[in-house]
Image: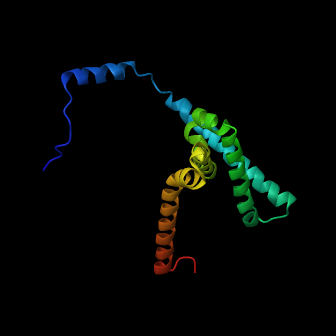
């Protein structure tokens, strides 16, 4: 059985699709890429600056400064999301604002804020972890596979 669910377009639907494509505005791909690159780079530079500050002022090693740096970036992202700034940044910068730590914190906190009126468990908790659940499962499975490969092949010993 071939794919019988593919629907053939009528001539009117084909004509409408062609008309819609002609009227669709061109996307500024180069400008969008530049914005994403600049904003993503600035977020990473901010993170590096925070880590350097922990290392200089708190006399931490690079490894010790990593966890508090991530915590500060998450806190900044959540505060900017609550203030409505991070969403505007995301609309302007696109994928550049989705740097893993800050983008994930934004996604979690915006879902929590959006569904808070539905209650703590069924609103905030359930909707916040719709995104987080898949990310956590993927991370756990990937970590398990990597650990298994390291165990089998003896890397890192």
* Colour pattern of the rendering: rainbow
Can you tell which quarter of the image residue 14 is in? top left
Where residue 8 sits: x, y (%)? 19, 32
Where residue 77 sits: x, y (%)? 68, 46
As rendered, which of 46 and 86 lies closer to the eye? 86
Tally the marks.
0
As rendered, which of 84 and 2 lies closer to the eye? 84
At horizontal 71% and vertical 45% (from top left) the residue drawn is 79
Q: Residue furthest right?
A: 57
Where residue 89 sits: x, y (%)? 63, 36
Which of the image's four quarters has the C terminus? bottom right
Q: In the figure, is residue 17 to the left or right of 11?
A: right
Q: In the figure, is residue 32 to the left or right of 18?
A: right
At horizontal 51% and vertical 27% (from top left) the residue drawn is 28
At horizontal 75% and vertical 63% (from top left) the residue drawn is 62
Where residue 145 sits: x, y (%)? 46, 70
Up the image or down, 55 lies above or below 98; here it is below
Q: In the figure, is residue 18 to the left or right of 91?
A: left
Up the image or down, 111 lies above or below 93; here it is below
At horizontal 56% and vertical 37% (from top left) the residue drawn is 94
Up the image or down, 59 lies above or below 17; here it is below
Q: Residue furthest left?
A: 1
């Amino acid at each position: 059985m071939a794919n019988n669910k593919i629907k053939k377009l009528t001539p009117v639907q084909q004509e409408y699709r062609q008309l819609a494509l002609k009227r669709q505005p061109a996307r500024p791909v180069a400008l969008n890429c530049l914005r994403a690159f600049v904003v993503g780079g600035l977020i990473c530079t901010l993170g590096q600056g925070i880590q350097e500050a922990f290392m200089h002022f708190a006399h931490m090693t690079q490894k010790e400064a990593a966890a508090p740096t991530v915590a500060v970036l998450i806190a900044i992202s959540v505060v900017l999301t609550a203030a409505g700034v991070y969403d505007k940044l995301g609309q302007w910068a696109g994928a550049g604002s989705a740097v893993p730590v800050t983008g994930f914190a934004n996604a979690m906190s915006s879902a929590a804020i959006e569904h808070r009126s539905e209650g703590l468990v069924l609103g905030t908790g359930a909707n916040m972890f719709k995104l987080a659940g898949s990310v956590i499962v993927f991370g756990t499975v990937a970590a398990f596979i990597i650990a298994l490969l390291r165990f089998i092949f003896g890397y890192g010993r």
